[in-house]
C-alpha cells in the first residue's frame, strides 16, 4: 500500500511539475502578485517594524537565491520570495519617505496660513481647499501638518493654486474607520501627506501672489491655471450639470455634479464614466494615435520610408501625458497613464500592445512607485477588469486563429456584442472587489453600458478631444454643443436604469479569507494556461462558500458612547438617535447589506427607554445605555453590557462589559459579539469585543491613545436616590468635530471606482 501511495504521489508531483514547466514563459505575470504579497504582509502587521529590520528578509532572500541553480523551478520560487521580501521593504521605505506630522488632537478656531495647492468647488456652497501649511495656530514645526484640507463654507471665494491665504478653521486628524475593518481614510491621508482636515465658515484672506520659488511650483501653478481656464470655458458654453459632467470628463473636476446624479451613475453601473481612468485615457490617447497614423499614412513619402506607427505611438504617449496633466493627476488617471505608456512602449519595441505581460508590467511599476496602491479599490478593480478582458481576448484569439474579414453588418453586430461580452467579463472580474469594498452590485450594468459606452466612445470623448484642440482658436462650442447631447443621453440612461426595480443589490460584508480566495482563484484562471488553470475555480468556489460566514456584531458603540446600535430579534440593526451620526449608521448598514436609510434605523425600536437611559436584551444578554448619572449605578449592577457617554465611575464594577466615553474616544468604534459558550450550552453567552484601534494596530497612521493598565479618571458616586449629583463634563479628551467623515473618507473610497 505504501509503495502504491508513493507511486501515486510521485505521479501527481511529476504531472504538476510538467504543468509548471509548460507555463514557465508566464512566470513573469506573477511578479506583481509576488511583490504585492510582500506589501500586503507589511500592512498586515500590528506594530511598525524598524527600518533596518524591514530589509532583513530581503537580504536573506537574496542570499538564498544565490544558492539555488539558475533555470530551475526552485530558482523561480526563490525569485518570487525575493520579490515578496522586496515588496515588504519597499512598503516600509515608502512609509518613511512620505512621513510627515499629523495633527494629534482636534483644534477649534485656529489660524491657518499657507499656500493653496488645490481648489475643488463643492456646490452649492463653498469649496474644498488643500493648503501647504506654513502656520497652524501656535503648533511647533515638528507638530504642524505639512498639508491640510479645509472645506470653506462661504460662497464667493476667489482663490487659485499658488495663492497664499489665511483663514480661521476647525481642524481634526484624518478620520478613523467607522467600524473595525472598514475603509481607513487616515492611512490614505498618510500617503497623500495630508495631516489634518477641517472646515471654515469665515471668508479667507487671500494675499497677492509672490514669484514661484521653484520650477515645480511654477509648473504646478501653470497646470492648475490651465485646468481652471478650461473648466471656465466649458461652463461658459455648457452651463448647469451638463457642463459639470463635461468638465469632469476633460479636467477631472467633479465638484459640480450633484449627489443625485452621482447616485444614478453609481446605481446603474456607469460611475466609471465620470472618473477619468482607463476608458477615457484609451479613447483620448487612442484617438490621437489613430489620427496621427492616418495623417502620416496619407503622405506616401513618409509612410513608405519611416516607421509611422511608432511615430503615432509617441504621439499617443504625449497625448496621454498631456491629458494626465490637465485632468488633475488623480491616482486613477496616473494608473491609466502608466498602462497606456506601457502599451505604446510595446508598439515602439515591436511587441503586441494588448498582452498580459504589459498589464503585469504596468501593475509592477505602479506597485514599485506607490506600494500603498495595492489597497486602493480603484487599482484592484481596474487591473482585475483589464486582466480578465486581456486574458479572455488572448484565449479567444488563440482558439479562433486568423479569420476572413467579416461582413460590415457582422462588424456592427460584433461591436455591440463585444460591449455586452466585455461588460460581462469585467463585471465578473470586479464582482469580488465591489462586494468587499462597496457591498453593492449593479444588476443592470450590462444594459446601461450597452447604451452608454457606444455614446461615450463614439460621441462624447472624441468631441471632448476636439474641444481641447479647438479651444486655443476660441471655437470649442463647435465640439462642446454636440458633446452635450451625448452627455444628456448618458445621464438619461443612468437615471432610467438606476430607477429600475432591484437595480442595486446590497451585499453583506464578506470575510477577508473569502475575498483572498476569490482573487487568487481569478488570478490563477487568468494567468495560467492548459487545464491547470481550472484549479483556480476551486479557490473561487471556496471563496464563494466562505462569503456568507462573516460575523455580525451584536452591539455597536461609537461617537464617544452617544451612538449605540444593537441587533434585534429579526437580525437587523436598531439604533438610538444621536447627534451627527448619519455617517456611521450608513456604514454599518452597508456592512450588513441593509438598504434602509439611517433615519429609519435610528428610532430605537429595540430599546426600552425612560428619562435616564435605555435597556435592551440581545441573545439573552441585558444591554444598558445610561443617559443620566442617576441610572449608572443600577445599570452597572443589573446589565452585562453597559454603555456610558461619560467617563466610567470607580464604583461601576466590571460585572460584564463597560464601554465608556474614554474607551470609544481612544479606541474608536466598539463591535461587541455575543456568542454561546461552546463548552456549556446552558451557561451564559460569551462576550467579546473588537475595536477600530485593535484592528488597525499601532502604525504611523493609527496612533494608540491608551496603553494597557492606564488608570481611568475616578468619579464620585452619584446620589442614586434623587440623581442630584452631576458627573463632570468630559472635557479632558475633546470629541472630534463631526464634519469630516463623509466628505473625506467615504468620498475617497467611492472615487476609487475605475
Image: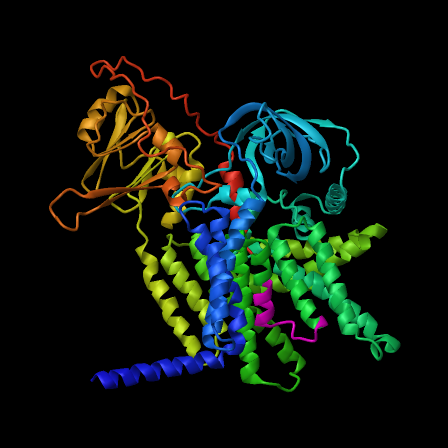
Question: Is any atom of residue 263 visible in this view?
Answer: no
Question: Is any atom of residue 220 visible in this view?
Answer: yes
Task: Give the colour scheme shown.
Answer: rainbow
Q: Is residue 351 magenta?
A: yes
The correct choice, above or below, for 38 with respect to 560 in the image is: below
Foreground of the two, 587 or 655: 655
Residue 114 place in picture, x, y as percent = 67, 31
Residue 437 place in picture, x, y as percent = 45, 52
In the rendered image, the quadrant that contains the N terminus is: bottom left
Foreground of the two, 650 or 294: 650
Residue segment shown in magenta: 348-362
The correct choice, above or below, for 731 with respect to 243 in the image is: above
The image quadrant that residue 2 belongs to is: bottom left
Residue 691 place in picture, x, y as percent = 35, 40
The image quadrant that residue 397 belongs to is: bottom right
Could you tell whether 484 is left or right of 302 in the image?
A: left
In the rendered image, the quadrant that contains the C terminus is: bottom right
Residue in the image at 70% along x and 76% along y: 350
Could you tell whether 85 is left or right of 676 in the image?
A: right
The correct choice, above or below, for 164 with respect to 585 in the image is: above
Residue 441 place in picture, x, y as percent = 45, 57
* Number of numbered markers: 0
Foreground of the two, 338 or 59: 59
Residue furthest left in the image:
682
Q: Does the magenta stretch include residue 503?
A: no
Could you tell whether 160 is left or right of 612 in the image?
A: right
The image quadrant that residue 672 belongs to is: top left
Amino acid at each position: 500500500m505504501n509503495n502504491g501511495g508513493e507511486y501515486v504521489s510521485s505521479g501527481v508531483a511529476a504531472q504538476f511539475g510538467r504543468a509548471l514547466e509548460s507555463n514557465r514563459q508566464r512566470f513573469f505575470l506573477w511578479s506583481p502578485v509576488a511583490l504585492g504579497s510582500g506589501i500586503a504582509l507589511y500592512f498586515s502587521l500590528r506594530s511598525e517594524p524598524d527600518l533596518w529590520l524591514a530589509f532583513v528578509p530581503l537580504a536573506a532572500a537574496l542570499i538564498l537565491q544565490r544558492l539555488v541553480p539558475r533555470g530551475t523551478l526552485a530558482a523561480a520560487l526563490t525569485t518570487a520570495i525575493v520579490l515578496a521580501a522586496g515588496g515588504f521593504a519597499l512598503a516600509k521605505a515608502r512609509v518613511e519617505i512620505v512621513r510627515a506630522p499629523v495633527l494629534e488632537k482636534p483644534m477649534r478656531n485656529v489660524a491657518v496660513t499657507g499656500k493653496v495647492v488645490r481648489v475643488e468647488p463643492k456646490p452649492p456652497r463653498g469649496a474644498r481647499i488643500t493648503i501647504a501649511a506654513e502656520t497652524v495656530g501656535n503648533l511647533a514645526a515638528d507638530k504642524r501638518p505639512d498639508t491640510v484640507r479645509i472645506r470653506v463654507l462661504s460662497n464667493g471665494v476667489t482663490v487659485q493654486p499658488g495663492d497664499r491665504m489665511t483663514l480661521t478653521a476647525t481642524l481634526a486628524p484624518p478620520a478613523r474607520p467607522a467600524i473595525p475593518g472598514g475603509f481607513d481614510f487616515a492611512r490614505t491621508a498618510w500617503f497623500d501627506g495630508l495631516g489634518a482636515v477641517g472646515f471654515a465658515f469665515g471668508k479667507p484672506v487671500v494675499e497677492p501672489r509672490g514669484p514661484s520659488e521653484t520650477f515645480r511650483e511654477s509648473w504646478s501653478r501653470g497646470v492648475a491655471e490651465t485646468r481652471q481656464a478650461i473648466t471656465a470655458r466649458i461652463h461658459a458654453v455648457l452651463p448647469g450639470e451638463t457642463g459639470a459632467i463635461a468638465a469632469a470628463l476633460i479636467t477631472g473636476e467633479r465638484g459640480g455634479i450633484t449627489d443625485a446624479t452621482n447616485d444614478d451613475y453609481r446605481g446603474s453601473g456607469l460611475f466609471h464614466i465620470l472618473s477619468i481612468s482607463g476608458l477615457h485615457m484609451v479613447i483620448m490617447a487612442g484617438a490621437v494615435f489613430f489620427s496621427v497614423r492616418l495623417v502620416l499614412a496619407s503622405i506616401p513619402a513618409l509612410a513608405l520610408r519611416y516607421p509611422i506607427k511608432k511615430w503615432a505611438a509617441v504621439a499617443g504617449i504625449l497625448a496621454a501625458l498631456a491629458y494626465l496633466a490637465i485632468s488633475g493627476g488623480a491616482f486613477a488617471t496616473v494608473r491609466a497613464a502608466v498602462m497606456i505608456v506601457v502599451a505604446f512602449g510595446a508598439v515602439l519595441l515591436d511587441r503586441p500592445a494588448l498582452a498580459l505581460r504589459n498589464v503585469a508590467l504596468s501593475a509592477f511599476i505602479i506597485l514599485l512607485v506607490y506600494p500603498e496602491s495595492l489597497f486602493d479599490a480603484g487599482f484592484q478593480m481596474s487591473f482585475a477588469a483589464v486582466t480578465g478582458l486581456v486574458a479572455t481576448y488572448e484565449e479567444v484569439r488563440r482558439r479562433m486563429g486568423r479569420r476572413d474579414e467579416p461582413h460590415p453588418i457582422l462588424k456592427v453586430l460584433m461591436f455591440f456584442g463585444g460591449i455586452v461580452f466585455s461588460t460581462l467579463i469585467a463585471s465578473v472580474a470586479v464582482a469580488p472587489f465591489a462586494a468587499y469594498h462597496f457591498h453593492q452590485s449593479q444588476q443592470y450594468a450590462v444594459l446601461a453600458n450597452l447604451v452608454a459606452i457606444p455614446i461615450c466612445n463614439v460621441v462624447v470623448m472624441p468631441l471632448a478631444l476636439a474641444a481641447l484642440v479647438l479651444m486655443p482658436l476660441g471655437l470649442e462650442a463647435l465640439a462642446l454643443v454636440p458633446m452635450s447631447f451625448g452627455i444628456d443621453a448618458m445621464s438619461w440612461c443612468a437615471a432610467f436604469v438606476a430607477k429600475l426595480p432591484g437595480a442595486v443589490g446590497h451585499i453583506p460584508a464578506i470575510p477577508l479569507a473569502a475575498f483572498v480566495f476569490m482573487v487568487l482563484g481569478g488570478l490563477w484562471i487568468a494567468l495560467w494556461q492548459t487545464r491547470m488553470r481550472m484549479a483556480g475555480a476551486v479557490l473561487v468556489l471556496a471563496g464563494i462558500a466562505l462569503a456568507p460566514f462573516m460575523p455580525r456584531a451584536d452591539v455597536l458603540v461609537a461617537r464617544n458612547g452617544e451612538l449605540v446600535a444593537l441587533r434585534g430579534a429579526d437580525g437587523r440593526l436598531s439604533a438610538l438617535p444621536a447627534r451627527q451620526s448619519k455617517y456611521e449608521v450608513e456604514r454599518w448598514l452597508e456592512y450588513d447589506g441593509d438598504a434602509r436609510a439611517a433615519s429609519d434605523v435610528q428610532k430605537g425600536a429595540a430599546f426600552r427607554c425612560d428619562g435616564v437611559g435605555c435597556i435592551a436584551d440581545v441573545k439573552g444578554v441585558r444591554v444598558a445605555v445610561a443617559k443620566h448619572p442617576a441610572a449608572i449605578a443600577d445599570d452597572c449592577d443589573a446589565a452585562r453590557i453597559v454603555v456610558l457617554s461619560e467617563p466610567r465611575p470607580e464604583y461601576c464594577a466590571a460585572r460584564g462589559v463597560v464601554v465608556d466615553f474614554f474607551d470609544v474616544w481612544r479606541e474608536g468604534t466598539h463591535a461587541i459579539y455575543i456568542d454561546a459558550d461552546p463548552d456549556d450550552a446552558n451557561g451564559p453567552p460569551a462576550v467579546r469585543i473588537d475595536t477600530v484601534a485593535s484592528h488597525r494596530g499601532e502604525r504611523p497612521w493609527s496612533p494608540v491613545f491608551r496603553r494597557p493598565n492606564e488608570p481611568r479618571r475616578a468619579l464620585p458616586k452619584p446620589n442614586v436616590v434623587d440623581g442630584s449629583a452631576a458627573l463632570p463634563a468630559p472635557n479632558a479628551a475633546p470629541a472630534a468635530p463631526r464634519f469630516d467623515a463623509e466628505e473625506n473618507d467615504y468620498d475617497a473610497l467611492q472615487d476609487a471606482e475605475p
